[in-house]
């Protein structure tokens, strides 16, 4: 056995010797480009030595399906994911495991049933209308920041039954800072303890306290209203949910679930929307086709769930944006039992990396993989692809609980905004994907608005 625990006689290929140092530096400098290059050079299963630890990088849909679906019981969320997110999310749905996770997922699930989600549509439409009330043709706006503020408003109204007007923009800044802070700590060779009062540690502490205070505000407002037993929003369900043994969630559990849904419930959708405006502005012929479809089906109305079956191109646009700029661009698992993947044996404790960014641009599954071509989704591609070739919402039992919510929100926001405005990227504004915990446009997306009606 090697020091990493993988049987050395039979190990997946991967860089060794001096290239390891080069690889670590390359990942730090350009993680997205490096992951694609490694997949091209070494193939479907690669031993990736990063920071003196082997990770196994899976670049074949079948191997991804093995980890996320077929052998999922042998895998937990990775130690790395936990280290990065646990400080903020605690033991919320995203990272909890085992019986505790199953119970919490069962309790939260009713808030995400199709019928329940469709009831959120009216609130979503209202939020969008209110958000763009002050927008005028000729304005220059950062669409990434705007989408964060909008999806935050939607999440707070629908999931927690309250409003948060003044704080909205700061939540986005807090999250950006905390993501950079956590990833920076993981990537740094020297890790200063978080308790030391450096300026960055102090700011991280302040930002966490700020987010915590918001979440506790949602909870105490709901408790003060005394309607936790009757409300049908997510927070009410969580507050009144009883397990079979009659116990309720502790205040800490409630805080962790609320924080998880608060952050997971708006940030990823905001990134999807921001990338949508960027890709449409770069691809005018597709933008026109979308406008035509919206004009003929909606004629100026805001879309409702009943319209969606008549808007196939809108859905194709969303699928294509999720392919090219998946907000969750990498997924990791650590094995808790021996597992065999791709003909190799891995002991418990092996970490598997699966990248949506890499798989979604694999030329074996997508023609012209780097081009924005929504029409590729119009002829049943989704049902022909192996599941591990396209997994923007993950797969298996840990698949995103909010997928239906996100798709409905995206369709309402795009369907409404695209009928009112055309967005043009401000000249020379650099759009650079930044792989934080989610895939974000590093400098935002500055656009000029042109009124359409
Ligand atoms: C475009 C938007 C979204 C994307 C791309 C996305 C992506 C994902 C992915 C890839 C996972 C699985 C992570 C893994 O396997 O390790 C996940 C899980 C999760 N997502 Fe989403 N998500 C989105 C929107 C939402 C929304 C709107 C909510 C809530 C309202 C949400 C809540 C969650 C939760 C709670 C989990 C953990 C589920 C579990 O493990 O049981 N997400 N999401």
Image (cartoon, grey):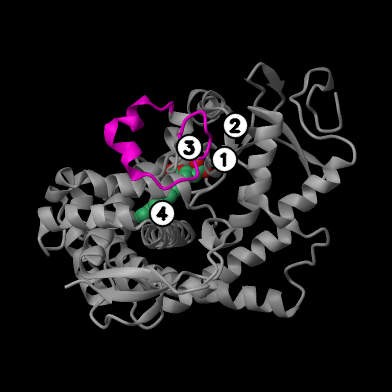
Mark in the foreground, 2 or 3: 2
**Residue situated furthest right in the rendering:** 18
> What is the spatial separation of the Cα atoms under label 1 and label 3, in whole angstroms?
32 Å
The residue beneath circle 2 is 59
Mark in the foreground, 3 or 4: 3
User: Which residues are drawn in magenta?
Assistant: 361-386
Looking at the picture, does residue 425 appear above or below residue 399? Answer: below
The residue sitting at 18% across, 55% down in the picture is 292
> What is the spatial separation of the Cα atoms under label 2 and label 1, in whole angstroms?
8 Å
Q: Residues within 10 Å of mark 1 (few under 14, many from 20)?
A: many
Q: Secondary structure at mark 4?
A: loop
Q: Residues within 10 Å of mark 3 (few under 14, many from 20)?
A: few
The residue beneath circle 1 is 358
Is residue 42 covered in magenta?
A: no
Taking 77 as reference, is 117 left or right?
left
Disc sitting over residue 249 in the figure:
4
Which comes before the other along the chain, label 1 or label 4?
A: 4
Q: Main secondary structure of the magenta part?
A: loop
The residue beneath circle 3 is 99
The location of residue 5, given as percent across then percent down, is: 80, 29
The location of residue 34, given as percent across then percent down, is: 68, 46
């Amino acid at each position: 056995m090697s020091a990493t625990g993988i049987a050395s006689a039979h190990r997946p290929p991967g860089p060794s010797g001096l290239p390891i140092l080069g690889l670590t530096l390359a990942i730090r400098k350009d993680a997205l480009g490096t992951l694609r290059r490694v997949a091209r050079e070494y193939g479907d299963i690669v031993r990736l030595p990063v920071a003196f630890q082997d990770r196994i990088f899976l670049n074949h849909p079948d191997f991804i399906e093995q980890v996320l679906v077929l052998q999922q019981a042998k895998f937990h969320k990775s130690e790395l994911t936990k280290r990065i997110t646990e400080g903020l999310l605690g033991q919320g749905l995203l990272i909890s495991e085992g019986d505790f996770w199953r119970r919490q997922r069962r309790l939260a699930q009713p808030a995400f049933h199709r019928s329940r989600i469709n009831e959120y549509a009216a609130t979503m439409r209202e939020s969008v209308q209110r958000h763009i009330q002050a927008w005028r043709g000729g304005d220059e706006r950062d669409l990434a920041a705007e989408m964060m503020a909008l999806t935050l408003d939607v999440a707070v109204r629908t999931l927690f039954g309250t409003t948060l007007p003044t704080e909205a923009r700061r939540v986005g800044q807090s999250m950006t800072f905390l993501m950079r802070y956590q990833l920076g700590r993981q990537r740094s060779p020297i890790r200063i303890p978080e308790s030391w009062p450096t300026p960055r540690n102090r700011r991280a502490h302040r930002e966490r306290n700020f987010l915590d205070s918001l979440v506790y505000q949602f909870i105490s407002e709901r408790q003060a209203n005394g309607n936790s037993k009757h409300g049908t929003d997510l927070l009410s369900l969580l507050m009144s949910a009883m397990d079979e043994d009659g116990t309720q969630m502790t205040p800490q559990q409630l805080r962790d679930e609320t924080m998880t849904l608060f952050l997971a419930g708006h940030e990823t959708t905001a990134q999807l929307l921001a990338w949508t405006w960027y890709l449409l502005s770069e691809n005018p012929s597709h933008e026109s086709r979308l406008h035509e479809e919206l004009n003929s089906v909606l004629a100026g109305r805001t879309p409702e769930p009943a319209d969606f079956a008549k808007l196939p191109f809108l859905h194709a646009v969303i699928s294509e944006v999720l392919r090219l700029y998946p907000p969750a661009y990498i997924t990791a698992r650590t094995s808790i039992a021996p597992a065999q993947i791709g003909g190799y044996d891995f002991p418990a404790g092996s970490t598997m990396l699966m990248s949506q960014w890499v798989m979604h641009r694999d030329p074996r599954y997508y023609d012209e993989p780097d081009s924005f071509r929504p029409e590729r989704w119009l002829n049943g591609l989704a049902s022909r692809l192996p599941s591990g070739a396209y997994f923007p919402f993950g797969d298996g039992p840990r698949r995103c609980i909010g997928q239906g919510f996100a798709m409905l929100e995206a369709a309402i926001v795009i369907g409404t905004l695209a009928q009112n405005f055309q967005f043009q990227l401000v000249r020379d504004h650099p759009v650079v994907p930044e792989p934080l915990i989610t895939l974000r446009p590093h400098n935002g997306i500055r656009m000029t608005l042109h009124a359409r009606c």
